[in-house]
């Protein structure tokens, strides 16, 4: 078995490596990041950068199982059709396909969770190997929910890694095409129109969906200086 792991997320790449090494010490994998990352930052031995769009035939020739662990480059159709490719996705398919799922779940009142699935030519679309929902609390921000999603992705990987490598799992077909959100949909949420009317619930949901640690996401434009003013919220639930 020749396994490749492609990741643009340092935390996830290390966690995946630990799970694979702990559960399958006899199995080795080659680690890559896409053109969107700097391989030196990964601090994984022999990690290589690969432009998947240009050099995917190298992957086809050299590997028979490929994991996408938050890889930011789209896998070409030929790659997913010629090699078994598995995606670990920070959303519950098919409800949360695409970019930054928890953001859209909070704003659009959609369920969320984590999914491991076989890849096909469409985004976050293939047959599902494992998935789990996570409850969204009214005090969750994008960051607090994201942290729970990542831990759920790892929980699913711990449970299913052996069956994935050994190809002994069963899959379920997604019930529908679901929802797909892209980076441009996220970008369209950032500018707050101060004239727009909304309920407090909508406003709080919008702002908590864009509150993610240090990221400067939501903003309005100050009318005097024309400068962006970034906005985030602090939500704290009382202790019982
Ligand atoms: O690696 P990842 O957690 O996942 C993203 C997509 O959500 C996922 O669908 C795709 N399969 C994967 C390849 O890329 O993304 P990240 O580490 O860039 O961001 C993590 C979270 O941080 C994100 O869910 C929301 C938040 N964030 C990120 C950026 C860059 C912001 O709130 N603002 C930002 O500008």
Image: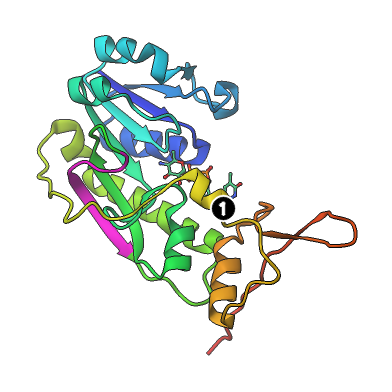
Above or below: residue 36 compared with residue 97 = above
Q: Which residue is mark 1?
A: 188
Badge 1 marks a residue whose secondary structure is: loop
* Viewer-side residue, 224 vs 168: 224
**Residue 130 placed where, x, y %?**
22, 50
Residue 162 in view in this figure: yes
Is residue 94 toward the left or the right of residue 216 in the image? left
Horizontal side, residue 221 vs residue 135: left or right: right
Name the spot of residue 102 as percent of width and height, x first: 45, 59
- Of residue 216 and residue 11, the one placed in the foreground of this image is 216
Q: Is mark 1 within 8 Å of ligand 1?
A: no
Picture residue at 54% right of the left edge, 72% below the top: 205
Q: Is residue 177 above or below residue 211?
A: above
Looking at the image, the residue that sits furthest to the right is 224
> Residue 214: image x %, image y %?
68, 53
Q: Is residue 106 left or right of residue 173?
A: right
Q: How is the image coloured?
A: rainbow
Q: Please say whether residue 103 is one of the residues in the magenta stretch.
A: no
49 to 173, vertically: above or below: above
- Residue at the spot x=52%, y=70% of the render? 140
Of residue 210 and residue 9, the one placed in the foreground of this image is 210
Q: Quadrant of the N terminus?
A: top left
As drawn, the residue found furthest toward the bottom would be: 240
Residue furthest to the front in view is 195
- Asked whether the viewer can see residue 26, the reply is no
Residue at 65%, 54% (x, y): give it: 217
**Crowdedness near tag 1: few (<14), some (14–19) or many (≥20) residues, C-alpha within 10 Å:** few
Position of residue 65 relative to residue 141, above or below, is: above
Q: Which residues are magenta?
A: 123-133
- Percent across and percent down for residue 131 are 25, 54
């Amino acid at each position: 078995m020749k396994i490749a792991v492609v990741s643009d997320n340092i935390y996830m790449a290390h966690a995946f490596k630990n799970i694979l090494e702990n559960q399958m010490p006899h199995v080795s994998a080659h680690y890559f990041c896409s053109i969107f990352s700097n391989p030196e930052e990964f601090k994984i031995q022999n990690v290589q950068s690969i432009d998947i769009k240009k050099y995917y035939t190298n992957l086809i020739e050299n590997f028979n199982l490929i994991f996408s662990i938050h890889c930011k480059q789209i896998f070409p159709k030929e790659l997913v059709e010629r090699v078994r490719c598995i995606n670990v996705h920070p959303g519950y398919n098919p409800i949360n396909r695409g970019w930054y799922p928890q953001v859209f779940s909070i704003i659009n009142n959609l369920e969320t969770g984590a999914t491991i699935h076989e890849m096909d030519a469409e985004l976050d679309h293939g047959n599902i190997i494992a998935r789990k929902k996570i409850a969204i609390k009214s005090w969750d921000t994008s960051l607090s929910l994201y942290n729970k999603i990542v831990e759920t992705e790892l929980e699913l990987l711990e449970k299913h890694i052996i069956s994935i490598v050994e190809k002994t799992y069963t899959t379920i077909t997604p019930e529908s095409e679901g929802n797909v959100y892209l980076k441009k949909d996220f970008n369209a949420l950032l500018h707050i129109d101060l004239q727009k009317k909304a309920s407090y619930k909508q406003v709080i949901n919008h702002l908590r969906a864009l509150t993610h640690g240090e990221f400067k996401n939501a903003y309005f434009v100050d009318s005097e200086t024309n400068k962006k003013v970034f906005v985030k919220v602090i939500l704290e639930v009382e202790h019982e």
